[in-house]
């Protein structure tokens, strides 16, 4: 995928890297102007503040767009002053900054860009997309990186040439899509043969017993702004209870899970305000998504065999399955 300079927030007219995009409907080339137009199927795609948009502004990920624009900076390492996102990405993937430098990376589902920042800092040529308006939060935070390309698109209809990326990265996404198996298998259409991947997904046996599952049938239908207000009000009362229960010897982790609020004791966050912000964000993230479909290790292993992937590793990490390997 040919890359060149791009500044998020410009008009989008005449931006050279847009020519590398493809129509997600027919895979035809796109003509670049004030919008992107496919001459083959006669569809036009708007450019919204420098970001090509291939999905309607209203979609099933509205809540994610709301949360990431409210919490644009919360989880960025450059904001927290801690290498939380960097350690998670490099630790889970097994990749090094040296291996990524100069390589093309496709990030599927960027959120506000906490991992986008880490990838760009390695010197990789990063193409990142999200179905929600979170792409604008990402652009505001990471637009300083000259080799970042941002697109708003569906994971089922990506506007990229197939088999065109060296690395594929997808964290915190596939369990929140309508069809997890289809999502997982679609990703690999865009990774070149021999390319490396790292994907995570909620682990079924850990995620299902959580009390949030009792709340989600009600909370996922509440408008995002209203639900956020409810979470923002509840966290200051519930977080101290959860932290106190978590400190109980031996039984603490199990007791803390009885309170439907996100805690981050393991991250070593520096102060109460920071911990509260992370808790509000992640508690909302638990309760708002329309879809949440954790997966078993056996099912994931079957999918990797269906795709004939190589050097596959499936590791359990704090309620997640992390799948990595080579196409």
Image (cartoon, rainbow, N blue to C red):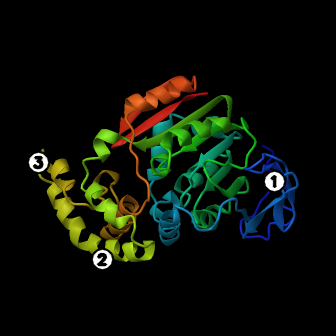
Distance of label 1 from label 2 (alpha carbons): 44 Å
Please tell me which of labels 1 and 2 falls first in the chain: 1
- Element at label 1: helix
Picture quarter containing residue 97? Answer: top right
Q: CA distance from mark 2 to mark 3?
A: 29 Å
Residue that numbered label 1 is attached to: 17
- Relative image position of residue 126 (x, y in whole percent): 67, 48
| Residue in front for this viewpoint, 102 or 209 | 209
Q: Quadrant of residue 96?
A: top right
Crowding around mark 3 (Cα neighbors within 10 Å: few <14, some 14 to 19, many 20+) is: few
Q: Quadrant of the N terminus?
A: top right
Precedes in sequence: disc 3 or disc 1: 1
Residue 122, visible in the rendered structure = no
Residue under the image location 60 percent in, 47 percent down: 107
What residue did someone put label 2 on? 233
Local secondary structure at mark 2: helix
Q: Are marks 2 and 3 in contact (CB under 8 Å)?
A: no
Whether residue 169 is situated above or below residue 136 in the rendered picture: above
- The quadrant where residue 32 appears: bottom right
Q: Residue at x 33, y 60 (%)?
A: 216
- Residue, disc 3: 249
Please state if 13 lies on the left or on the right of 89 as rendered.
right
Q: Residue at x 15, y 53 (%)?
A: 255
- The earlier-in-sequence mark between 2 and 3 is 2
Where does residue 122 sit, x and y in percent of width and height? 62, 45
The image shows residue 37 at horizontal and vertical percentages of: 84, 59
Question: Is the residue 107 above or below the residue 281 in the image?
Answer: above
Residue 257 shows which numbered tag? none
**How much space separates mark 3 and mark 1, taking CA atoms?**
56 Å
Taking the image as drawn, is residue 87 in sight?
yes
């Amino acid at each position: 995928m040919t890359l060149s300079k791009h500044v998020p927030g410009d008009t989008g007219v005449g931006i050279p890297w847009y020519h590398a995009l493809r129509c997600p409907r027919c895979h035809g080339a796109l003509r670049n102007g004030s919008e992107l137009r496919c001459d083959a199927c006669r569809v036009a795609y708007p450019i919204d503040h420098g970001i090509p948009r291939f999905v309607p502004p209203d979609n099933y990920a509205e809540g994610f767009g709301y949360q990431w624009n409210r919490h644009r900076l919360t989880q960025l390492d450059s904001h927290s002053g801690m290498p939380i996102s960097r350690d998670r990405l490099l630790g889970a993937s097994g990749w090094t900054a040296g291996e990524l430098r100069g390589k093309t990376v496709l990030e599927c589902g960027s959120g506000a860009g906490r991992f986008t920042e880490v990838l760009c800092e390695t010197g990789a040529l990063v193409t990142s997309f999200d179905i929600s308006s979170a792409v604008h939060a990402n652009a505001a935070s990471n637009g300083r990186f000259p080799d970042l390309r941002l697109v708003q698109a569906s994971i089922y209809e990506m506007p990229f040439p197939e088999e065109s990326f060296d690395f594929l990265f997808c964290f915190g996404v596939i369990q929140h899509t309508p069809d997890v198996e289809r999502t997982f298998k679609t990703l690999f259409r865009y990774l070149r043969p021999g390319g490396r991947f790292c994907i995570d997904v909620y682990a079924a046996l850990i995620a299902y017993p959580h009390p949030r599952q009792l709340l989600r049938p009600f909370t996922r239908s509440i408008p995002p702004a209203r639900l956020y207000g409810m979470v923002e009000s509840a966290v200051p009362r519930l977080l101290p209870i959860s932290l106190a229960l978590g400190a109980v010897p031996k039984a603490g982790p199990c007791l803390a899970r009885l309170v439907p609020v996100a805690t981050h004791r393991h991250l070593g966050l520096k102060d109460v305000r920071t911990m509260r912000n992370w808790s509000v964000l992640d508690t909302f993230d638990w309760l708002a998504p329309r879809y949440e479909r954790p997966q078993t290790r056996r099912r994931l292993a079957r999918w990797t065999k269906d795709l004939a992937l190589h050097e596959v590793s499936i590791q359990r990490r704090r309620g997640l399955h992390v799948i990595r390997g080579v196409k």
